[in-house]
Amino acid sequence: MTADKISRPEHPPFGAMAELLNHRAVLSVLFMLPAASILLLFLTYPLGLGIWMGFTDARVGRPGIFIGLENYFSLFDDDVFWLAVFNTLVYTIVATVAKFGLGMWLALLLNHSLPFKAFIRAIVLLPYIVPTVLSAIAFWWIYDPQFSIISWSLHRLGLIDTYIDFLGTPWNARWSVIIANVWRGIPFVAICLLAGLQTISPSLYEAAALDGATQWQRFRYVTVPLLMPILAVVLTFSVLFTFTDFQLIYAITRGGPLNSTHLMATLAFQRAIPGGDLGQGAAISTAMVPFLIAATLFSYYGLQRRQWQQGGADE
Amino acid sequence: MKDLTRRDSLKLGAASLAAGVGLGIGREMPARAQEPMLDLKPEKDASLRVLRPAKFVAGDEKLWLENTAKYTQQTGIKVKVESQSWEDLRPKAAVAANVGKGPDIVYGFYDDAHQYPDKLIDVSEVGNYLDKKYGGWYDVCRRFGMRDGKWIAIPLGAAGARIVYRISHLKEAGFDAWPSDFDGMLKASQGLAAKGHPGGLALGNAVGDANTWCHWLVWSFGGRMVDEKDQVVINSPETIKALEYAKELYKSFAPGTLSWLDPSNNKAFLDGQISWTINGISIYYTSKNSKDEKIKAMADDIGHAILPIGPVGHPTELHLTVPAMVFAYTKYPNAAKDYIRFMLEKEQYVPWQEASIGYFSQPLRAYEKSPVWTSDPKHTPYRDLMANMLWPGYAGSLGYASAGVMADFVMVNMVAQAASGAKSPQDAAAEAQKRAERYYKL
């Protein structure tokens, strides 16, 4: 048998099929098909269905008919909806800033040589590992107006006369659930940023030190730009998780008091499932999408500027 | 598995007949030979999945499971009982209705059946049979269970609310018994607070407790979410009066009630931090059965009183009603109906009420004679819940709008806003009107 015969068989076993499979575009489509099917089935279809339902008057047990933008007009005139939008923005912005500030600080600490480094890093992850509902129930007790461990301790120390009403006034409740979210979210940010920090070559810090850079300048001009790609990704995920939070609120306050901790996600659930108004619940969920897209675009295009990553200034 | 026939029923009932007759249930009913009979002919090899609210008192679930085992033993039909937390029960039932798959029977809440009547089977045979056999349904049960002349759900009972108070504290405040009028109640609450014994009623988004007392309060003054024609009329002088009353009452509450969910008042009462609340019999039950000597000792000091009747002049209570629904997707409709019937027969129902010390009050008049109501005088105030109650969306119809308004806590939020001073009674009522109109205009 000659080499020529091997490369060009006279009677290829599958003729046209083999020819097709040799085609680069066809192969690409074939290889992407499994992943695309999963995305279509579990992401695109539910998302599409949700958006469609937002244009219908679907109710529990009834498919509903197309009603155009009626659900959205109704929401536009709904004070509780706008309160939920406000709460969601406050919750997301404050919690994200706090998580990134504290997470970065924790990551920088953990990046130093510490005794029992691996053990400490594992401990740091604990709040993230504990199921959300369990930590939410723990916070529910911590914030209880009658049984709060914080109030009890401060009272025993003689620092307060009456127990703190953590969840009984709108702003107290907002801060309380934000703190719970920050406590839970810090490990994710810290560990991701720590991973980023460890990819930065120590020689860059040495060079900066030789150039007389202060510690702040080393952080500002070496650490931050090199950390920015991972920061952008982590920020995106963190914003998405916080904006769509449900479990913490549902377990701690159910959106109270006076709807002051209702997030868009919890309000959508309340209206759609216990309230039976699937169309309006879907409309509230859909109304979250523009905010999420804006946050994603900001992370990608705002924080991934090349000039920053190369230590340059903004244009 | 075998079909339940009249003869079988007589045989099976023999063992527990003594219980029913001995307990007085059925004394005023026709002799057994003339008793209505219902042979539903459960399907061969049937098996059932039942979803019910999670227990609030241990005896409830224990007897429920024992009665279920008895049903299986008598019929050969396997029954799997699943319990769901109160907050998650309605969503789960709603999802089952929507996707057409899930438990065969759901013991839901309030007006669930009127949200998806097309997804449920007609259970009129059971409704009519029980009606004839047990002295008739209370009027409100027909409203919860019937639609267009058919039974679409069978009420199991209602977990009710009564004034729960500390007898010694009330005496300390100068009252021998809980007042039966609103002025007296306000004075009692203020007197208790002045003595360092505040009260506390849930004002957070608490599905059970908050809805129960807020509706009762507003209705007591003549306020209503809607009129008989489903027109929203909550922004009325009567509602404003109720809210002004709530504002005064709130001043005598313990701190934090704006955030209270359903378990909060139970915890605070048993810890001695509040001296009165509105609740089911669960506080007394927990105290009586506690292993903690301090909590157990409290049981003797716990008193129960019926909810005062307001200026409107008639009882206006709301209690957590539990309707049993059979979903149309079930493969075993007859078995499902038969199970619902079985659990409401006196041989099962009376011991179940006894074990849960009347946590659920009956939907059928004959059970007013259940011994649980007289075995301990502290149980008696919980007896007539369903005789005295109205329904969500009173005085209008049950359906999407009434369910939506209640699920959105429109009434609770209005009372909480006015009581806490977050809004004036006028503004709170105006906001509630606007919110409710969004549901009722559909």
Image (tube, grey):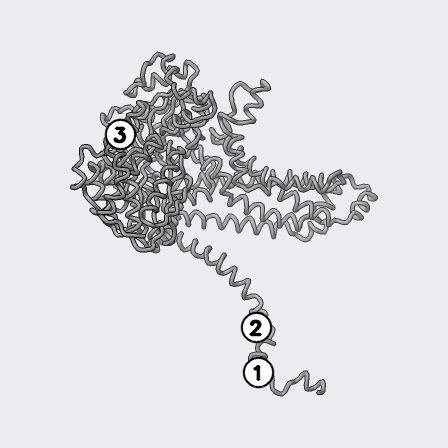
Q: Are marks 1 and 2 on the same chain?
A: yes
Q: Is residue A195 left or right of residue B297?
A: right
**Pointer 1 or 2: first along the chain:** 1
Residue that badge 1 annotates: A15
In this picture, is A273 found above or below A33?
A: above
Is there any visible trace of residue B65 in the rendered image?
yes
Give the residue drawn at x 44%, y 41%.
A82
Along the viewing direction, whichever of B326 and A215 lies nearer the viewer: B326
Q: Residue at x 75, y 42 (%)?
A: A218
Percent across and percent down for residue B405 are 34, 39
Residue hosting label 2: A26
Instruction: Give the side of residue B108 with respect to residue A102, left or right.
Output: left
Given this view, does label 1 or label 2 mark the residue nearer the observer? 1
Distance Cα–Cα, label 1 vs label 2: 15 Å
User: Residue B40 at x, y = what percent?
Assistant: 25, 50
Q: Residue at x 51, y 63 (%)?
A: A37
Q: The disc labelled 3 sits on which kind of residue?
A: Asp
The amino acid pointed to by label 2 is Val
Observer able to see residue B226:
no
Q: How packed is label 1: few (under 14 Cα within 10 Å), some, or many (20 or more)?
A: few
Check contact, mark 1 vs mark 3: CB within 8 A: no
Tell if the residue under mark 3 belongs to the same chain as the one under mark 2. no
How busy is the neighbourhood of tag 3: few (under 14 within 10 Å), some, or many (20 plus)? Answer: some
Which image quadrant: the N terminus of chain A? bottom right
Circle 2 crowding by C-alpha within 10 Å: few under 14, some 14–19, many from 20: few
Q: Is residue A31 left or right of residue A62?
A: right
What residue is pinned by disc 3?
B384
Residue B203 location, x and y as percent?
40, 30
Q: Secondary structure at mark 3?
A: loop
Q: Is residue A196 above or below residue B259?
A: below
